[in-house]
Amino acid sequence: MAVTARPELDVAAVRTDFPFLEELVDGLPFAYLDSAASAQKPRQVIDGLAHFYAHSYANVHRGVYALAERATDGYEGAREKVRAFLKAPSAREVIFTRGTTEGINLVAYAWGLDNLGPGDVVVSTDLEHHSNFVPWQYVAQRTGALFTTIPVDDAGELLLDDLDRIAALGTVKAVAIGYISNSLGTVNPVERLTAWAREQGAISFVDAAQAAPHRAIDVQALGCDFLALSAHKLCGPTSVGALWGRAALLERMAPFNLGGHMIRKVTRERTTWGELPAKFEAGTSPIAEAYGFGLAIDYLNAIGLDAIEEHEQRLLRYALERLPEVPGITLYGPPPERRSGVVAFNLGEIHPHDVAQVLGFEGVCIRAGHHCTQPLMSRFDLIATNRASFYLYTTEQEIDRLVDGLHLVQRKLG
Ligand code: C6P
């Protein structure tokens, strides 16, 4: 019987696609270990965008001339690429946004304001990025609903035993969960939580900002009602992302932004809304950005999301093996089998910003701070951590540079 080998990622070949690696500082390229904040861009995206601006640029959905048609084809072609990337049933259900944050706000406001009230419960988690926490908390407060969270254990994994307690608090109407934690890398049991939401008669929202760049997504298999992602974290441009939502829900929702393009008819007395997805895309669209989002999806597909996930798992295990060599280090987060390529740590009493700054002098780029997860930080009685995060261009040698850099920090500041 034929055995299909999983494709392996050729990291040396991948690295030739990234111009930022051509810059050498003291003979070495940057060890960019901050991809969870934003990913670097390959020349396939950079050059493709330049070509689009030079040869296919105009406003979309308006002009009838060749340039406008090319631009519209590029923009709508990108929507189809996002649909296929998420395995969504229809491109009508894909709305271009400014990013994950806007997608979450869109649903929290446009769905929440009309569907929540006293006695209702909105559930998020203590792992969430503020983007998937604050809008739900705010809309719950505005509507009189109760906002609550699923707590986490000492490894940063959700305590699902708490779901029964939460269900008893009222009528659970919305469940907002991150697929992968940006602070700890925890991979949440999304299917289980969306099934629980369905049992409660609630909608489920998945923040896939940290998942979509690193693993194949299938919104139908996940069983969610909404899912949001950002292009900049998956090698695409900034200021564009997508919200996927079930058509039946999106059709019943009021618009979020009002203005041009999203209307059917405007009179002095009243305005009626356009069809999906236009109803949620007021104003001039992020035309080139969406096109570049499509190029980034092509790029990731050509390498293979499975190969990327496997590469990052190898790097994660290597980092978790090597980092404990550093004296005084504390590592946070779950075991590698339920975790993505994110490593959070502290170095004794040395402030994370000082650690990151010394590493920065060595060309090692990591993030320090609360990572927009203050509820999670307070759960662990922390103000901040250091965070190294990996992507398809990351190598084991870069993790070695991180470990060497941390030894240096200990010598200088420990
Ligand atoms: N996290 C990080 O360094 P935007 O800014 O809209 O593209 O993404 C917001 C967002 C939402 N959810 C999760 C899980 C995220 O990680 C992020 C962005 C960056 O961790 C910037 S704080």
Image (cartoon, rainbow, N blue to C red):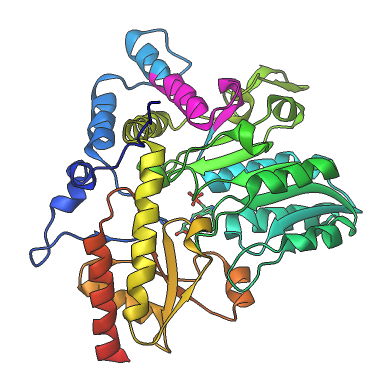
221 lies left or right of 150: left
The structure residue drawn at horizontal position 60% and vertical position 21%, both measured from the top left corner, is 92
Q: Is 194 located above or below residue 379 in the figure? A: above
Q: Main secondary structure of the magenta part?
A: helix
Q: Is 254 located above or below residue 328 in the figure? A: above
Q: Quadrant of residue 326?
A: bottom left
View extreme (front): residue: 1
Across and down, in percent, residue 105 comes to 64, 46
Is residue 35 something that shows in the picture? Answer: no
Front-most of residues 407 and 42: 407
Is residue 70 something that shows in the picture? Answer: yes
Q: Quadrant of residue 44?
A: top left
Front-most of residues 181 and 95: 181
**Magenta highlight on residue 77:** yes
The structure residue drawn at horizontal position 66% and vertical position 58%, both measured from the top left corner, is 134
Q: Is 238 located above or below residue 341 in the figure? A: above
The structure residue drawn at horizontal position 52% and vertical position 68%, both measured from the top left corner, is 333
The structure residue drawn at horizontal position 34% and vertical position 49%, both measured from the top left corner, is 311
37 lies left or right of 48: right
Which quarter of the rendering shows the N terminus?
Answer: top left
View extreme (left): residue: 27
Across and down, in percent, residue 393 comes to 27, 50
Q: Is 183 located above or below residue 171 in the figure? A: below
Q: Quadrant of residue 406?
A: bottom left
Which quarter of the rendering shows the C terminus?
Answer: bottom left
- Give the magenta range: 74-95
Front-most of residues 41 and 31: 31
26 lies left or right of 271: left
Across and down, in percent, residue 157 comes to 62, 64
**Magenta highlight on residue 194:** no
Across and down, in percent, residue 178 comes to 60, 52
